[in-house]
Amino acid sequence: MTPKQQHAFDKSAFKISMVQHLTQLGHAPDTAQLRDWYLALGRALAEHTTSDLVATEHDQAIKQAKSVNYLSLEFLIGRLTGNNLISMGLYDAIADAVSELGLGLTDLLEQERDPSLGNGGLGRLAACFMDSLAAQQYPAVGYGLHYEYGLFRQSFHEGAQQEAPDAWREPEGYPWELVRPELSQIIGFYGHVEVVEEAGHTYRQWVPSLKIQAMPWDLPIVGYQSNTVYPLRLWEGRALTPFALDAFNAGDYTHAQQADIDAGNLTKVLYPNDNHDAGKTLRLMQQYFHSAASVADILRRHLEAGHALAALPEYETIQLNDTHPTIAIPELMRVLLDDYRLGWDEAWSIASRTFAYTNHTLLPEALETWSEALIARLLPRHMEIIFEINHRFMQEVEAKWPDDVAKKQVLSVIDDKGERMVRMANLCVVGSYAVNGVAALHSQLVKRDLFPEFDALYPGRIQNVTNGITPRRWLKFCNPDLSNLISEKIGEQWPAQLEQLEQIAQYADDTAFQKIFMDVKKRNKQRLAGWVKEHLDITLNTDAIFDVQIKRLHEYKRQHLNLLHVISLYQRLLNEPDFDMAPRVVFFAAKAAPGYELAKSIIYAINKVAETINNDPRVGDKLKVVFIPDYRVSMAEIIIPAADVSEQISMAGKEASGTGNMKMALNGALTIGTMDGANVEIREEVGDDNIYIFGLDVDGVSELRQKGYQPEAVYHSQPLLKAALDSLLDETFTPGQPGALRPVFDSVMGSGDPYLCLADFADYVRAHNDIDRDYRDASQWARKAILNTALVGKFSSDRSIRDYVNNIWQLEAIKR
Ligand code: PLP
């Protein structure tokens, strides 16, 4: 809704519309359940966003401007209703309207299931970026997949992770989505390549043997306080073959539905892996399906707007969110060469000026490679094109470094040591006009360690764009009390200009403001404690330090280092009569990839330790450990505003950026962190006094490895650490089951401690002691918390998007 329409918001008309939608859903107002009302609310609101979506789509100024196409296999958007109300400027008006219907808006919003169409940071980043593109009105389309099941729902059975399917669309469908059959595409797989002769030229033509329909569903990305609504277009796989009525009539029900089953499987489920390449055929099929449908749609828009094919890079840029959509590069080449019959040089000039690639990781296990044999079978023409790209690229390398076999080996798109594999990241760098890392340190390491040869060959191509988060969802919506406090002090502009928060810094020493600020924090802690009481039946002391680690479970993120600290606090409470500490609640929330055994063992260990500590009367409310199940965006929205301490403790050099770190700092939590990812830049912004940095930095890590690291020596030299580790081997936390936590012990002691938990333990404990000391000085702590909120304006995703726009994409904002 436009600002003009907001003034004209007609409450009674809206209530009538809600009741009409309720009736269409088959319910009467006096008997309808909350869920029915939520669906009616969503549908009534979506009427407005759909008309703005269509109007934006038909805007001539946008068609004549350059757009970014954000290609991502994941968009972890979270619930849309509350966020859209904020963007539409209608939150209070709708709260008022529904209260007249006898309903509470927050209760209605709670009815929405999170669309969890992503694993973690990468998918959530894509969602924040769409929000910031729409808010700043840089023309954009997001392209993703319409998974029937999002990331699994997590529960615990006797401490162990259980996974259940996430049917996020509910039986009635999701009220915000709009199916667009007129924009569907047909996508091929398998088959062979034919040579065709025409007018004295030979062309190659792929003849796929399987075809699947790509059906787009649009979700509205509503610009904050504007009537710009961009589509997040999600492709769903559908059977193309008509339903086999003959077979059905003859009683062969399974065969009749076979095509539906195959096509439907394609986008059935999101792969639940974070920072790990699983290499499954269905996953490559998903990637190609996503890429091909998106490239086809981009070309359709471009040509329908009346632009020449050769002008594609002037009107469209395609941002690849990690290597997952890399196959879009050979796909665009295939279309240009085989369908439009351009020559190689012309096609390559177009493609290589259209794509840009974001690298999200240096972890070797996450750098995607696909078997050449698999690609050749599934996408035979694409494999030919990849060979040709690589052949020409190798000539370039030869020209730059004649006779240098080693250079060719590291740069080649094909890895031919062992089974021949296609290195997707190399293909991305070769086929893109810009490559970026996601935080200053990470981008530096991409240049120095991952792609030094590429950096030498293409100076300037590898850049940095530090990640960001949308302040609309991650402050204005999730923390209304803090938002109101900020607005009272500095006005209402900050959600669109987050740097303005700096003005809050002047109140950091104002005791009256400190009290109000910490009262807000207290209420947020009470809200979280209420949730924990209701769902987990654990009573929490809200005066305690709320110490929070929420993120995917991964060894490199070192939840087990946190666990060792928790155990050592427990042991000190029991064994040292003079030991005193400020009360603490340590929160964990994390999903482990279902196939990642050690990650699941760590979850199990945390749950077992939590159970023991929480039920030990000797501990009282000095220490509690809470593992919140099913971490997701809507849960993050409750936990983050309540955090006092933000755990960002990855081994230096492993976390590309992190965005949870930014969210908690913005909401007034103090970071305990390593010099990793965006922690480095958070420290630059908030200053050394307002962050707790510990542990080895990137250089320290490599020096230690060079010297030769022996975790056993650390174990034997540090009694606190040794005692904590030993308790994993006996029955302390698993009565009657000694050794049940051994996998966690072995992961640091038997496997050489690959993520240096033991090496960083002592300094981690030291940093936590500093936190304990500082938290007891309420005024000093409040000052630090206020300064965190005030000084992290840099981490707005609006700024990230402006960096992409100015340094990479070169877009103009189109104000509607
Ligand atoms: N999962 C969810 C639901 C999130 O909201 C976020 C980011 O805030 C992440 C994962 C990524 O967290 P981190 O950057 O701490 O790994």
Image (spheres, rainbow, N blue to C red):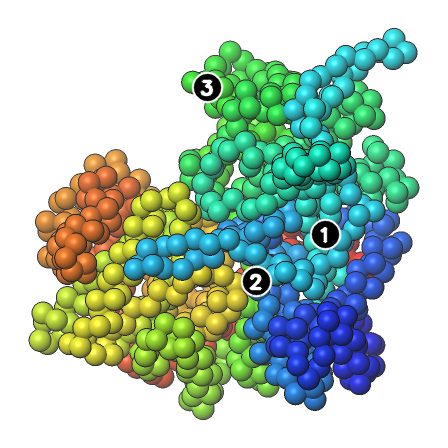
* Quadrant the C terminus occupies: bottom right
What residue is drawn where x is 67% and y is 32%? 329
Judge by depth and name the residue closer to the eye, 381 or 112. Answer: 112
What residue is drawn where x is 83% and y is 26%? 340
Q: Which mark is residue 217?
A: 1
Which of marks 3 and 2 precedes in the sequence? 2
Q: CB of mark 1 within 8 Å of CB of mark 2?
A: no
Specify the amino acid type for callout 3. Answer: Glu
What residue is drawn where x is 21% and y is 44%? 746
Judge by depth and name the residue closer to the eye, 328 or 358. Answer: 328
Question: In whole angstroms, how far apart are the C-alphas of marks 2 and 3?
Answer: 40 Å
Circle 1 packing at 10 Å, graded few (<14), some (14-19), many (20+), is many
Left or right: residue 562 versus residue 572 is right
Q: Nearer the viewer, mark 3 or mark 1?
A: 1
Q: Which residue is mark 2?
A: 114
User: Dot 1: what SS?
Assistant: strand
Percent coordinates x, y for residue 790 in the rendering: 51, 73
Would you say the beta carbon of the disc 2 residue lies within 8 angstroms of ligand 1?
no
User: Dot 3: what SS?
Assistant: loop
Q: Nearer the viewer, mark 2 or mark 3?
A: 2
Q: CB of mark 3 within 8 Å of CB of mark 1?
A: no
Q: CB of mark 2 within 8 Å of CB of mark 3?
A: no
Q: Which mark is residue 732?
A: none
Q: Which residue is mark 3?
A: 419
Check the image and name the residue furthest to the bottom: 512
Q: In the picture, residue 343 is in which quadrant?
A: top right
Judge by depth and name the residue closer to the eye, 101 or 323. Answer: 101
Specify the amino acid type for callout 1. Answer: Trp
